[in-house]
Image (cartoon, helix red, strand yellow):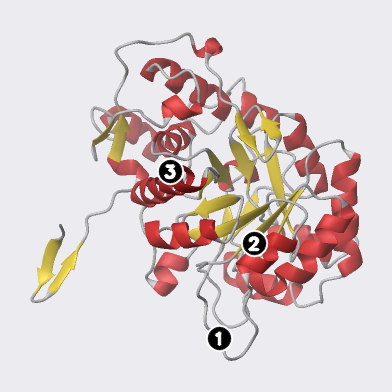
């Protein structure tokens, strides 16, 4: 059923993370006795959080640090890390740019060609840190860079674009055959991004190993404003998780759902997991880490697009170490630090022993959940310029 917009047009009501809340359980658990881990293609990760493949977030050092702490970081194979031998000066230049010149500067700095040898080298450097290595590319470069990454020892390959479908049509370039690609790749393939049940099911049927959910919700992404497309993350996650469960029931293959973007704090991550996600992909929260290469700045993956940028550079600041942001102890009270601790505490309060039980949490529509009774907090933040 949908709501009538006008004669002959109906629309389905969809929900974002700010509009729902989790209901506490009838039984509660000691947070220290909950299990936040997830399994992905033979790899065990203690924390269900992935750092997104954005140049202001992940470089080799960050990927190693993230892996050591129990998470996973994805390196962008088409960014500054693979265009420049030493990208530190480029990153500093982006951070120093004014807001007016930032997008044009990023477009210019992403003009030099990608060096294939650097794709190989970056993967090898991450593996030297004794952590899992994950690399991303757009569909048009997936076959070439997927092989490079796999040969270099990568553990996962991510094929990522603004909107991903199995039936992409183009007369200008050859489209990626996901079924053939997944069959020939010797390492697990994660694909994104998408938001729909039918599309998710079609993608899973090609043999993918993981699915990224989310179109346009990221802090540095402007897709929704530029293109007018997207589905709020609660509805998107629930729909794609339903496709995952249907696919598993009839094939026996479980394809993890990874909610990607739109999560500013621990509570948002908890809601995404409770909606059915097996893990989440986060960018802006990690861009605030001392280890992040962006120096307190964060920009969307499509910001460098020459004709139609669908991302922007934002200043998120540097608020703490990666360990504080991921594992605590938190020095801030806004939920942006100790993300793993937030998951544990939320799981304990709803009575979930593991992620799969957390996915069964009762959800309610509660658009006032973030503002009810918070008048003094709002006034304090306004006074502090937050």
Q: Which residue is mark 2?
A: 159
Q: Position of residue 26 (x, y in %)?
A: 29, 12
Q: Position of residue 132 (x, y in %)?
A: 78, 40
Q: Which residue is mark 3?
A: 245
The answer to which of marks 3 and 1 sits earlier in the sequence is 1
Q: Which mark is residue 271?
A: none
The answer to which of marks 2 and 1 sits earlier in the sequence is 2
- Which residue is the extreme one toward the bottom? 171
**Quarter of image, res 49:** top right
Q: Which residue is mark 1?
A: 170
Going 52% across and 38% down the picture, which residue do you hit? 278
How crowded pointer 3 is (Cα within 10 Å; few <14, some 14-19, many 20+) is rated as: some
80 or 272, which lies in front? Answer: 272
Going 60% across and 55% down the picture, which residue do you hit? 208
**Quarter of image, res 290:** top right
Q: Position of residue 261 (x, y in %)?
A: 50, 50
294, above or below 335, in the image: below
Mark 2–mark 1 contact, CB under 8 Å? no
In this picture, residue 129 sits left or right of residue 75 = right
Quadrant where the N terminus is found in the figure: bottom left
Quadrant where the C terminus is found in the figure: top left
């Amino acid at each position: 059923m949908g709501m009538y917009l006008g004669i002959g047009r109906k629309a389905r009501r969809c929900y974002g993370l700010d509009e729902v809340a989790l209901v506490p359980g009838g039984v509660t658990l000691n947070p220290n006795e909950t299990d936040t881990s997830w399994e992905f293609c033979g790899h065990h990760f203690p924390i269900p959080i992935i750092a997104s493949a954005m140049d202001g977030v992940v470089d080799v050092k960050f990927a190693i640090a993230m892996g050591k702490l129990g998470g996973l970081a994805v390196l962008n194979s088409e960014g500054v890390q693979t265009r420049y031998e030493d990208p530190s000066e480029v990153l500093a230049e982006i951070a120093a740019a004014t807001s007016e010149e930032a997008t044009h500067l990023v477009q210019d700095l992403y003009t030099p060609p990608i060096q294939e040898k650097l794709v190989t080298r970056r993967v090898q450097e991450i593996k030297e840190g004794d952590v899992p290595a994950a690399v991303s590319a757009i569909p048009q470069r997936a076959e070439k860079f997927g092989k490079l990454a796999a040969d270099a020892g990568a553990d996962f390959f991510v094929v990522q674009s603004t909107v991903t479908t199995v039936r992409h049509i183009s007369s200008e370039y050859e489209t990626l055959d996901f079924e053939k690609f997944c069959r020939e790749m010797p390492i697990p393939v994660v694909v994104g991004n998408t938001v729909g049940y039918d599309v998710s099911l079609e993608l899973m049927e090609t043999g993918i190993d993981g699915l990224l959910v989310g179109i346009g919700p990221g802090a540095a992404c402007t897709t929704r404003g530029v293109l007018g497309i997207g589905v709020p993350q609660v509805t998107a996650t629930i729909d794609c998780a339903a496709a995952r469960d249907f696919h598993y029931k009839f094939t026996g293959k479980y394809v993890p759902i990874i909610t990607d973007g739109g999560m500013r704090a621990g509570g948002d991550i908890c809601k995404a997991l409770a909606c059915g996600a097996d893990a989440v992909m986060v960018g802006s929260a990690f861009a605030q880490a001392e280890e992040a290469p962006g120096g307190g700045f964060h920009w969307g993956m499509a910001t460098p697009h020459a004709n139609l940028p669908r991302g922007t550079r934002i200043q998120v600041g540097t608020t703490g170490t990666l360990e504080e942001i991921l594992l605590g102890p938190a020095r801030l009270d806004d939920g942006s630090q100790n993300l793993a601790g937030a998951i544990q505490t939320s799981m304990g309060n709803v009575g979930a022993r593991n992620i799969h039980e957390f996915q069964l949490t009762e959800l309610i529509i509660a658009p006032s959940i973030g503002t009810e009774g918070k008048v003094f907090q709002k006034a304090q933040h306004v006074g502090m310029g937050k």
